[in-house]
Image (cartoon, rainbow, N blue to C red):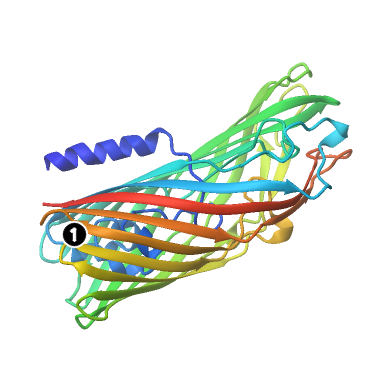
Amino acid sequence: MKMVKKLLPLSVGVALGSITVGAQASGFQLMEQNASGLGNAYAGQAAAAENASTIFFNPAGMTRLPGRQVAVALNAIRPSAEFSDSGASSAPLGLASPGGNGGDAGDWAFVPNAYLSWQLSPRWWLGIGVSVPFGLKTEYDQGWVGRFQSQKSEIKTVDVNPSVAFKVTDAVSLGGGVSYQKAQVKLDRSAILAPPIESRAHIDIDDSQWGWNIGALFNLGTDTRIGVTYRSTMDFDLAGTIAFTNAPVVGVTSQGVRASAEVPDTLSWGIAHQLNPRWELLGDITFTRWSKIKTVPLVTTSASALIPANFTLDTFNFQFKDTFRIGLGANWKWRDDFAWKFGVAYDKSPVEDQFRTTTLPDKDRTWIAVGGKYRMSKQATLDFGYAHLFIKDPVINQQRGVVTPPLQGNVVGKYDSDVNIVSAQFTYSF
């Protein structure tokens, strides 16, 4: 218990402090909810249930964990997104655009996770998880040509997920939980308030909401498990302020704004099959209902000298589509205390070419991953993994006005993008 008291508060503190991430599943969703699954490209996580991180992927999997177990992970993510102008990009009103293509909009980010499972009786388990289910950051060089559309964009979330599992029979387990999730969105960009003077707008909005997740785990004999899990949508009503700097118009400095957005729900099916004493095979299919996000208006909640209340300052036109993800993985038991992990996955993006933005220059990605699991002792395990995500040159054609509103300029070209992920996890049973 002393270890739990030390590790969980530390992980929660890190999570609640400053989480700035680049989304590595489709859209701005994060798959990096543990390190033990990274080596398999997160294939079959609804059925794997190898440690307490199953609380996020399928809470019914806790019934495979005797006694008490704590798992703490850290994921280091390095997305890269380098824009190349096709010659049609331009800032509004003929303003100069030093900085050109904006450099690499990605950078290193660190995503922590922490989980605790506790067997109360032969049939009942309790658990709690702290995770980061959604996240995004893009930041361009100062003065780049697309700065009127976005200079810096951030989505930060923290999810606290108490869970329970019940072993119905040796063949069937059920689980579920509730989630308290806090979300914050920040956006910096240039703005035209009094042509041709360039001002800066900073948007900062947040909200907290409740959601839920359920799962089931089926043992088909001693060698095969099938898991099914669902995580609910959450409807955020984000509120905060928009603040202007270098604003020459008297009375226009800051005012209240709001934006409503519904994060998607997910349904996942996974399988784990012990082929022989040394090889385990994994697979999964996951559906995400991104089509819940179409347009997100940014509306004022207070008035200024120039802008009235209930005025739509901007509309973020995402027009997301539903997506699926397919993953295949394998574990090879090299020695009694060490296993190698391998995985591939194909992850569809919700972003269509005609609606791609500088905030989220996303496209379909292919995962290739490798990792390992080292049993340090009877109680302690160390997992680690590496994944590379291939993304095929996303194109962008956002023409948002050079001489007519909304005066956000034109960004036309393509991105050179990829992602590297390195993760480590410590698991302790007691």
Give the answer, above or below, for where 28 lies relative to 336.
above
- Please report the residue visible at 70 percent of the width from the left and 36 percent of the height from the top: 310
Find residue 414 and report its horizontal and vertical position in percent: 71, 53
What quarter of the picture does the N terminus occupy? top left
Q: Nearer the viewer, residue 419 or 292?
A: 419
Q: Give the amino acid type for the residue marked by disc 1 in the picture.
A: Trp
- Decide if residue 382 is on the left or right side of residue 400: left
- On the image, numbered disc 1 is attached to which residue? 125
Which residue is depicted at the point 33% across and 60% down?
371
Q: Position of residue 301 (x, y in %)?
A: 65, 33
Q: Secondary structure at mark 1?
A: strand
- The residue located at (31%, 39%) in the rendering is 12
Q: Quadrant location of residue 322?
A: bottom right
Rendering coords of residue 218 (x, y %)? 27, 76
Q: Quadrant of residue 275?
A: bottom left
Tag 1: Cα neighbours inside 10 Å, few (<14), some, or many (≥20)?
many
Closer to the camera, 422 or 318?
A: 422
- Which of the two residues, 385 or 23, is positioned nearer the viewer here? 385
Using residue 382 as the reference point, say whether residue 398 is left or right of it.
right
